Structure formats: structure tokens, C-alpha cells
Image: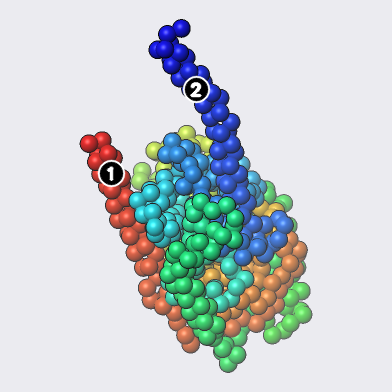
Amino acid sequence: MSNGSRKASLAAHKQKKQGSLSKPSHIKNITVDFSLIVAAALLFSAAFPNPVNHYGFGFLGFVAILPLPLLVRRASWRMIAPYGFVYGFLTYSLFNYWLLNFHPLAIFIVPVIYAVYFTALFPALKLADRVFPRYGFLVQLCFWLAYEYLRTQFFLGYPYGILGYSQFMVSPLVRVSGLVGIWGVSALVVYPAVYLGRAFFSGLTQPHKRIAFLLRSRPLPALVYLGVLAVALFYGFVSSVDYSEARHVRAAMVQQNVDPWEGGLQAYRASLNASLRQSSAALAEDPDIDIVIWSETSFVPAIAYHTRYRERQESYELVRELVGYLEQQDVPFVLGNGDGRMVRNEQGELAREDYNAALLFNDGEFTDAYRKIHLVPFTEHFPYRDTLPWLYGLLVENDTTFWQAGDEYTVFEAAGMAFATPICFEDSFGYLTRNFVNAGAEVIVNLTNDSWAHSVPSAMQHMAMAVFRAGETRRSVVRGTNGGMTSVIDPNGEISALYPAFVEGYLIADVPVYTERGTLYLRIGDTVAVFMTFSAFVLLVFCGIRTALDKLQANH
């Protein structure tokens, strides 16, 4: 055999050997990557209310995405987007598992939406790490906060899972939201994860040496964060308000523990009977009650519509029974109901419009109504009927009820207070509560139906967001629900009264009507979040241009 042939044979053997070794190595890398994805998904889900701990392990919020910086650094450009898809789908399947009971399509739609979001976000995080090798974690923080803000906007807006909400039991941090909203709290929670993630890039094998290396090589960002966190906690402590001298309203929140949407007149009757029964019991127990609050859609037949048109006699009989009961009461009632009316459509024909509404019955009559402004995507609202007719048809086939959106920030006056009634999903959006308070609301009264989920973690995740509405505005938040969590949150963002979930009954509590102090958030709203999003866009463009120039230079 010639020398040339021998060299060729050795080279082929070496290449074959390297190939045989690379396959196990590749499998190992994939296994590690997926382990990081699973770990991140589990940490994220555990930080919020979950089946193991209904209050969640809030401290895990600070490390919930810790595996992601390592994953982003390890993964190839070819795999980074698919990894984002898997992480988004897995995380929201675990975190929002209860969506399976909300709507047959919801457990598919929401995880897929977030899979798409993270398919876009993961490459951006990798760009930040590549273009800014020393302080890329700060750019990653900016990208993450921009993602959290953007996903609450537009048709698909869905605030569940903003990491700041994991701290709803830490009152000083809740009150920090009075500065720049939930976004400031999220920044405090996300920063440690993206910063400490750098420790795993040091190449050191022992965990304690990694942290020591990180602190020695980049002490300034750690010191700045610790200083900001200390100032934030100090502000949270000193900004606690004293509402002992404020006037109080004694409220009874009725929890009928019946989901009236389960079907037909029988369910409507069961809900009405439970609501009347518990209201009477509460008023008999405490004659000093100032107001009675029912939940969202606690009474289903649209009262105004059936009174006016009487298309279905059985529905009208329920309406008449309810109105007869309310006319005998000496205190105002707030209840969730549909607000239906006939209007002329574009063809000039009469057509019925329905709104998800809150009604105030006072002084022997229904005095005003609030019509829900921010509707739940897909299940209450779908504006793309003509663009996506197949999806619209699928939603209709699955018994989706579409509502019209209201446009007025109604503020009621009764029981010696001015109050607003965001309905269910609406208390998860800070801008809505801010607008209500700026319109004159002294107390926020949320009407909710979460019974469909049959899940305490679901109800707790919802209430966790409502806690921050009190922190952002320094106003009391009252939650009247049909299954949980019926509660009162004081102006300091602390849960002062809480009724057990999925139990028929009522909660009587004194609600502080505190208006002495406003907040920065009431004045500037989400301005900081908008600025952060703009900054993220500029940084993303810079990263893209820098990467393109580097490739161009390398090719030459």
C-alpha cells in the first residue's frame, strides 16, 4: 500500500472514529439542553400558586429562568428557536394546566401562543449574549421585560405568568408596584436569574467557585442590584399607609358556588337560589351590612332585555323573582349579569347585542351598568371572523359566547363610596384599574367567575394579580367570586379577608375607603414599560446589525 493510500485510510478511519464519538456527545448535549428546559418550566410553574402549594413558592421566582441563560449560551443557532418553542409550550401547559376546564381549545391555544413567543424570544436572548459578552445579561433583562409587557397588549393580551406576580405574598414588593407598576417588581425578580446565569459560563466546575468567580469578576452589577433591592424594600416598608381613620364600608360578598354556565335554566335557577339564600343569611346575621356583592354572571338571563322583550317566559319569571327580592332589601346590591339590547345592524335589521356587565340595584331600581371593556380573547371576543372563518366556526361549534366590548369607565356611587367593577379577567390589567381610579373610583370591586376551572391554583393565580392592583393604586380591592377567591385586599396590598374556595357561603368584611395617598403609577401608568420596550427594540436592531457586520468582516 502506498503512502498516499495509507494516509487516506488513516484519515478515513479517524473521521469514522470521530463520527462514532460525536453521536453520543450530540445525544448528551441534547439531553442536557432538554433537562434545562424541563428544570426552567418546573421552577417557573412552582413559583406561582400550584397544586402542591396553593400560595406558590414565591422565592423560586428569583431563579425561575436561571437555566435559560445557560441553555441560550449552549444551544446552536439551529436549535435555539425550536428550544424556545418547546419551553413555551411545556411551561404554559404546566403553569396553566387548568385551562383544560376553561374551554376545549384553550389548553391548546395558550401554550402554542407562548411557544411562538419564545420561539422569537430565545434567539433574541442569544443575540444579546453574543453581541454583549460582558454585560449581555442586562440586555437579556431588557428583552425579557419587553416581552412581558408586549404579551399583555392587543388581542392576545394575557398577563398570567408575569414573574413579578409570584411575589404577591411579599407586601413590601407589592407596594413597590405603586412606582412603575408590576414591571418594576418583575425587574427585581428577573435580574438575579439572568445575572447568576453568568456564573455557569465561567468554565469552573464547582458551584461555589462559580459564584465566587462571578462576584470577583463582575461585582458592580451585583452591588448595584443589592442596593436597588434594599431601597425598593425600604420604600415598600415605609410606603405602607395607615387607613385606620378612613371610613369603612361593611360588605357582604356572596359565593354561591354554582357555575351558571354549566347549562340551561336549571343552572340559572340553582345559582339564583344559592345567591338569594346566602344573601338573606348574611343580612340576617349582620344588620350593619352596607352593600351586598354577587359574582360575575351570578344571574344569567339579561334582566333589562327579558324585562323589555319577554321572549322566554321561564327566563322572565326568574328575572321577576330576582327583582321582587331586591325591591324588598334596604341595602344596595351589585351583581354580574348580561346586558342585552336590540340595535340595527349594517343592513338596517334589528339584531341583539350582548355585553358582560355589572349592575347596581339601589333605591328600588337598577340605577346603572358597567359593560366589560377588556374581553377575554377567543372565548369572549374574536374580531377575525372574516380573516379566519375556520377558527371562528370552530369556536362557535364549541359553544363560545361572544360579547360586545363596552367603552365607558363607569364609576358607581352607593353605600357611601364611589367604586368601579372590573369584571373577572380585567383585574389582571393594571391600566384598567388605573383608569377606574383616575375616573374617581375609591374602591375596586371585582366580580369574577373562576368556577369553570375547578382549580384552587387557578383562582389563586387570578387573585395574586388583583393584589398588585391594590399596590399600584393604594386602593382597596374587593373580589366577589362564585367559587374563589372571594377576598378583600387592603390599600397596602395585603389580603385582609379570604373565604375558602368552592364552598357556598358569604364573606362579611369591613372595606377601607382610603383615598389620602396616590401613587406614581396612577400618574405615569406603564410609561417605564413602554420605554423599556422601545429600548429593547433599539438593542435588538443593534444586535442584528452588529452580527451582520461581524459575518461580513469574517467573510472578507
Q: Which residue is mark 1?
A: 550
On the image, the x and y values in percent for residue 117 come to 46, 47
**Which quadrant holds the C terminus?**
top left
Residue sitting nearer the eye, 518 or 547: 547
**Residue 350 in the image: above or below residue 439:** above
Q: Which quadrant holds residue 90?
A: top right
- Category of crowding for the residue at label 1, using alpha-carbon neighbours closer than 10 angstroms: few (below 14), some (14–19), many (at least 20): few
Q: Which residue is mark 2?
A: 14
Q: Residue 342, relative to residue 399: is it above or below?
A: below
| Other-residue count near label 2 (Cα within 10 Å), few / some / many at <14 / 14–19 / ≥20 | few
The residue depicted at 51 percent of the width and 18 percent of the height is: 13
Given the image, on which type of amino acid does mark 1 rest?
Asp
Q: Secondary structure beneath disc 2? A: helix
Q: In percent of the image, x 61 and y 42: which residue is there? A: 104
Q: Give how far across and how far down residue 363 sits, in percent.
A: 58, 78
Residue 135, given in percent of the width and then of the height, sits at 39, 59
